[in-house]
């Protein structure tokens, strides 16, 4: 291990093998169907009431569509987990539904409008449509973010995380692709497929899920950091990397244009020092990111503490 730690810029090429299909493909029973209120009527929305307008994204055994309600013309995002998805993916869909239902009154979490099962066995989750897309798309099309814009993103995401963490919910997959914006400038957290409702504040959260590039060192190697890791602190690490990436235009631990494999990412995150922002960044932004990217999870600021940081709180009397 000592030899590995001396390699500050590993260049291993050991791709993570694709998960093998170990479970039979069979549909899991759904919880009771959620009633979905129309904007102007008390009837529930069925699959036949919705018209698909466009595909917004694919992945993790499902597809997200932009849909229109045929009667009211209201626009939604419809996430469909296909009936042939593996058992783990379907369980995550049920978990996502449960967590979204708990966060319906948070303005910084994408709004949940209900769920149902199609006759085909597909699981459908109806959500608020965010017309600005993801921060990943915004970076690709509009270029890097200014500090003023990043402060707004950080503040809104932290408000969402503070709400979730206060209810013992760890998101576990914060990244630019899972943060949505709309034309009104609102920023909201989305995609709770790998989130976890922790029954106790310090409950272990060791399952290996989420996007590995944004995982904290204690997530990769829990034993090296006391045996388990704090899912709330891991969300803060992921937020720090997200803001860093939006500022410089590429993933922080890598050179621009570099496409890493899993082993390279793991070694860079676990054995390298946390990345530092370029000199163009303000002292406040430097310090904010450093508070997020502490290698020791116990040293990272909480979401509530970060909301008082000068980078996002310009007037301490109102924070």
Image (cartoon, rainbow, N blue to C red):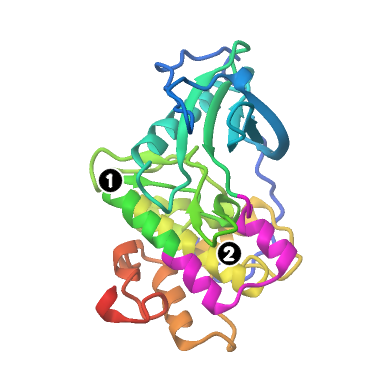
284 or 313, which is in the foreground? 313
6 or 74, which is in the foreground? 74
| Residue 247 on image: x %, y % | 60, 74
Specify whether residue 97 is painted magenta.
no
131 left or right, relative to 220? right
124 left or right, relative to 99? right
The magenta segment is 131-155
Displayed quadrant of residue 198:
top left
| Residue 114 on image: x %, y % | 46, 29
Label 1 crowd bin: few (<14), some (14–19), many (20+), radius 10 Å:
some
**Which residue does the numbered mark 2 point to in the structure image?**
268
| Residue 312 on image: x %, y % | 41, 75
| Residue 153 on image: x %, y % | 50, 65
**Any part of residue 274 in sight:** no
- Dot 2 falls on a residue whose secondary structure is helix
55 or 169, which is in the foreground? 55
- State the residue at coordinates (52%, 22%): 45
In this view, 139 is above or below 27: below
Label 2 crowd bin: few (<14), some (14–19), many (20+), radius 10 Å:
many
Specify whether residue 132 is painted magenta.
yes
**Which residue does the numbered mark 1 point to in the structure image?**
167
- Dot 1 falls on a residue whose secondary structure is loop
Question: Nearer the N terminus, badge 2 or badge 1?
Answer: 1
- State the residue at coordinates (52%, 45%): 210
36 or 64, which is in the foreground? 36
- Which SS does the magenta portion mostly show? helix
In this view, 264 is above or below 203: below
Marks 2,1: beta carbons within 8 A? no
Q: CA distance from mark 2 to mark 1?
A: 32 Å
């Amino acid at each position: 291990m000592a030899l590995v730690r001396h390699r500050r810029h590993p260049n291993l090429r050991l791709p993570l093998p694709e998960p093998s299909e170990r479970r039979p493909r069979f549909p899991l029973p759904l919880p009771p169907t959620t009633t979905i209120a129309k904007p102007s009527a008390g009837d529930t929305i069925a699959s036949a009431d919705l018209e698909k307008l466009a595909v917004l994204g694919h992945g993790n055994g499902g597809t997200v569509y932009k849909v229109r309600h045929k009667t009211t013309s209201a626009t939604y995002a419809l996430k469909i987990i296909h009936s042939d998805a593996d058992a783990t993916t379907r369980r995550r869909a049920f978990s996502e539904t449960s967590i979204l239902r708990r966060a319906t009154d948070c303005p910084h979490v994408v709004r949940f409008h209900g769920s149902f099962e199609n006759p085909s066995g597909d699981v459908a989750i109806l959500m608020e449509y965010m017309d600005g897309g993801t921060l990943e798309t915004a970076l690709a099309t509009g270029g890097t973010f200014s500090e003023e814009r990043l402060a707004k993103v950080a503040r809104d995401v932290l408000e969402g995380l503070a709400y979730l963490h206060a209810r013992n919910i760890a998101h576990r997959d914060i990244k630019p692709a899972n943060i949505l914006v709309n034309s009104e400038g609102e920023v909201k957290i989305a995609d709770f497929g790998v989130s976890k409702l922790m029954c106790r504040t310090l409950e272990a959260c060791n399952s290996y899920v989420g996007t590995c590039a944004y995982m904290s060192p204690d997530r990769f190697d829990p034993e090296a950091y006391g045996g388990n890791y704090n899912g709330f602190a891991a969300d803060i690490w992921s937020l720090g990397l997200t803001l860093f990436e939006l500022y410089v235009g590429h993933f922080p631990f890598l050179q621009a244009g570099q496409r890493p494999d899993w082993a390279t990412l793991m070694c860079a995150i676990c054995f390298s020092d946390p990345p530092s922002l370029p000199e163009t960044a303000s002292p406040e932004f430097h310090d904010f990111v450093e508070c997020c990217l502490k290698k020791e999870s116990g040293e990272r600021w909480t979401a509530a503490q970060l909301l008082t940081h000068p980078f996002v709180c310009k007037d301490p009397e109102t924070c």
